[in-house]
Image (spheres, rainbow, N blue to C red):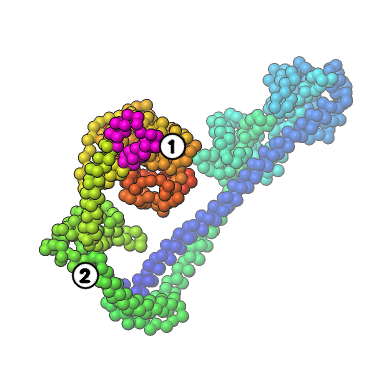
Amino acid sequence: MKRLFSGIGSKIVFPYLLLTLTVAGIGAFVVVNLVTGTLRERFNNQLLDSGRVVAESMVQFEADRLAVLRQVSHTEGVPESMATQDETQLTLLVPQIMANSPADALILLDQNGRSLFAWDRWSGLQTAVAVGGIDFAHLADVELVSSGFVDEFGDKRALLAETSSGTMLFTVGPVVLDDEVVGVAMVGTAVRDMVVTLTENAVARVTLYRATGEVLATTMGNGRDNMSELLSEPPEQYATVINLLAESPNRYQVVAEQADTQVPLRRVEVFNQQYQLAFGDWRLRNESFGLFSVALPSHFIVSAAATSRNLLNVVFTLATIAVFMIGFWVARSIASPLNRLVDVTTDVTEGNLHQRTGIRRNDEIGALALSFDTMTERLDERNRQLVTQRSELIAILNSIADGVIVLDNEHNMVRSNPAAARMIEDLVSDSSATLLQKLLASTNTAVDNDESPKRVDLNGRVLSISSAPLKTPEGNPIGTVMVLRDITRAAEAESLKDDFITNMSHELRTPLTVVKVYTDMLKRSANGHLNEQQNVFLEKIAKSGGELEEHIQKMISISEIQAGTLNLKKEEFSFTTFICDLVDEWREQIESRGVFFLLQTPKCELPVLADASRLHWAISNLIENALDYTAEKGSIQLTVKSDAEQVYLEISDSGIGIPHSDQPYIFERFFRAKNEVNFAKRGIGLGLFIAREIFELHNGRITLESKVGVGSSFRCELPLVVATAVAQEPA
């Protein structure tokens, strides 16, 4: 028994059989419901069509009554006879009109609502009082027509009234003579006859209801007495139907679907036969007289569903038996080659890539076996290639002069090349793990994987370290690679250069001071004995000395910045006031060159903690840089903004701009952008470097946006003293 249920054949057949039985049952249920649903949909569509026919027929009845009314009111002699209340003349004229009309009744009233003439199809001429005892003068619709009232639907009205001939539906209109209403004509249709005609037109049983739910007339049950009681509806049904019909997206006159947003279809049993009713609004000239319903027998739906269910059960039972038998044969034909595939797969999994299935069939299993053999061959070939590539990669890695270290996500070293091993051996006597921790602590690789090179001084050796994250093709991090380069000699040369620049700067300062002092003394002691040319010479000596002193001071500041000895005397002051004072110093010089100058600052004070003199120097370098490269009639704008934590200064100009290729190096020391205008301006390329360093020493920064021919914009940031300072506008 265990072998029977553990074989692959049984594992295929039994689930297959259960699935077939399940699908068969669900299929039978779905198909029966689809058949029933289709029949019900067709039934509802027919019910809907019948309702539309009823609504359209009611409109046609109204059109026929209007035609009769127009014929009567426009017949020569009728308006005159009504104006003179000549009943004899009306008796001669009107019956000839009504004899061939579709109307069932006609009542003519004078202007006061008094009956002048009455006619119906069953009894012919009647006296003026033989109209059901209705006082027409007091009917609201009659009063409106006789008064000449006209609304958006015209001067005609419709009303439902009980007469001696039964319930009548009247169309009421004025009779006019010389533009004056001389009477009222009422053309009527018997409700009981109208229901019969509607039934014939719609091919469905029709019932008319008052708004109170009372049955007026019906063709259900062949007019038996108890039909009115059986078909009557509660008074609230009228309001429900009217409201839901108004909400229907298709504005149907008949509700033909059962849903929460529509009127439920009512089912009634008449003479042991089930009928389904759908309701509509009985409306003429935008006035509702109640409801109408159409009814169709629905017993055939149940019969059709039962027949379909029995037939489908037989079909699905036979199909299930056939599927079960076929399943055994299919399982047997599949099991043998699958067992062979399992054996070969096991060998391949264990590393024996030389195994093949050897199955040759012209079906999917054969295709699977062929694909498996092809895959195995490619894996075998790929494995040989990987071995070759691995050897090549190891050879390349070992030949790299720089040290390469590969870390996992936990920053454990998983591989290094011989160059890295030699560096580790030369640098420390500790283990490689200890050195790795020192490198990580020095470069913050564990925190941010910064790819920019960093310098690390370890035991007298200077290393340049670059790091980058390792990721899978899908972007998942798998570790970090670090590249180590010994730059000890380059660092020593750079240090010697900095020391040389510092020493030379200090040495040049002394004779320069002597030159400046004696130049100033010569100017003071001349007492007007110098000619104009000699004064010019002294001015040039003083100006050049000042420029040289400024360059020397910049060189000294660079040395202090590089050595970390640049002292800052920080104090709290208003950045807004500071900028305004600084701009006042530059305004005359800027405007004297024909450059438009604009300053925008907030009204509030923005407190910062900074070295005012150093900050003055940095911002002056930026303003001077903007002025040097902005042509006459150009513009320079300073804008101060802030948020809750930072104050921002933006210095924009309409100058020549900076090439995109030079922008990454613009803040480097001794760098000057390469263009013709730059060569005309004197300088050693230190102003922007010093400005950036000063802002960074204040925990701020400077960024640049520039476009050649458009201008440049330097954005400076400084932290506010109070983080919650009120910001005038967001930066």
Residue 276 in sight in this render: yes
Q: Which residues are magenta?
A: 519-546
Looking at marks 2 and 1 on the same chain, the residue that comes earlier in the sequence is marked by: 2
Is 22 placed left or right of 442 in the picture? right
Q: Secondary structure at mark 2?
A: helix
Q: Amino acid at mark 1?
A: Ile
x and y percentages locating residue 478 in the rendered image? 28, 61
Quarter of the figure that contains the N terminus: bottom left
Q: Nearer the viewer, mark 2 or mark 1?
A: 1
Is most of the magenta stretch helix, strand or loop? helix
- SS of the residue at dot 1? strand
Residue drawn at point x = 44 percent, y = 51 percent: 675
What residue did someone put label 2 on? 418
Quadrant in which residue 359 is drawn: bottom left
Residue of label 1 = 636
Give neighbour class at mark 1: few <14, some 14-19, many 20+ (Cα, 10 Å): many
Taking the image as shown, residue 371 lies to the left or right of residue 193, namely left
